[in-house]
Each structure stands twice: as structure tokens, then as C-alpha cells.
Image (cartoon, rainbow, N blue to C red):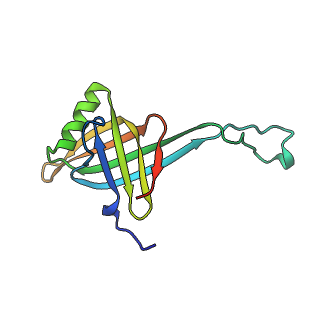
Amino acid sequence: MTVQTGSALLLKMRKDSRFPYETVAGLRTQSLTFNANPIDTSSADSASRWRTFLAESGMRDMNLQGQGLFSNAASDLMFRELFFSGGHLNMEIILPSYGKILGQFAIAELQYLGDYDGEMSWRIELQSSGALSFGTL
């Protein structure tokens, strides 16, 4: 496998299955975080006092953070609409030469930024809602 550029990590979204996925416009940085919250079953009787977890239990989730230039593109408008409506985004995250992640995400934070002598930008945090699937490219 060859080294991939950060710009090859693509975030695509759509309101629902009637629409095609659109690449998030103006994106400069993005990060994905997978979280697991296993159930701790440790006690004073645990072997050699090592922590133990209940197998195949607990909650899993994924957080997605991004920052980009505000260009009033379709994706910028969709972020705004879904934040105010409380809806979910259908996301397709492309990890080059690795696969894609599909699932629904809720907007946890939407922030607009701008310096008096610079460009206007936005920052968003999305949190998964429901099961995610992983597929090959």
C-alpha cells in the first residue's frame, strides 16, 4: 500500500437516499475517531488483579470532525438546514485504498469563524447515530 495524501480522505453526504452523495465543499482538515466503551467486569477476584471486560459488549460510536472554507456551496447549506431541523446526514467516508464507511450522523457542533483580514471558515463535529457499515472500494 502506498502513502495517501490527506486530501484523498473524502467526506460525502446526502439528506436521504433520493439524492446522490455530494462531496463536502471547501474541506481543509478532517479526522475520524472510533470509540468503544466496553463493560468493565473487573473485581477483587480478577486474575492477578488485571482489568477484564465483557466480550462483545458496550457501546461503539464514531465522531467526525472537519474544518473548511465557507463558500456557500450546497454542502454548507445542507449543514445549516440539518442543524436547525435536528435531522441526520447520510455520510459516505472514503478512506483511499482501504474502504468506505456508511452511516447516519447528527451534527453535534457547527461553528463559523472569520478574522477581519482573512477568509471565513466553518468547523463541524458529527456523531454517528446507529450502526455503521464498512465496505470495500
- In the image, taking residue 119 as reference, residue 16 lies left or right, namely right
Q: Residue at x 42, y 38 (%)?
A: 127
Q: Residue 97: image x %, image y %?
A: 41, 65
Image quarter (top left, top right, bottom left or bottom right) of the C terminus: bottom left
- Residue 60 placement (x, y as % from top left): 55, 40
Position in image of residue 16 (x %, y %): 30, 35
**Most distant residue in the front direction:** 18
* Left or right of 18, for residue 54: right
Q: Nearer the viewer, residue 73 or 15?
A: 15
Instruction: Point out the residue furthest to the bottom here.
Output: 2
Location of residue 73 with respect to 16 vertically, above or below: below
Q: Compare residues 18 and 56 and report the one nearer the observer.
A: 18
Count the marks: 0
Is 66 on the left or on the right of 43, as rendered? left
* Residue located 39% across and 53% down the image: 31
- Residue 86 vertical position relative to residue 15 in the rendered view, above or below: above
* Residue name at image x 34 percent, y 39 percent: 90
The residue at the point 21 percent across, 50 percent down is 25
Q: Please state if 90 lies on the left or on the right of 76 as rendered.
A: right
* Quadrant in which residue 108 is drawn: top left
Q: Nearer the viewer, residue 135 or 87?
A: 135
Task: Pinpoint residue 18: horizontal percent, then vertical percent.
Answer: 26, 36
Pick the front one: 48 or 73:
73
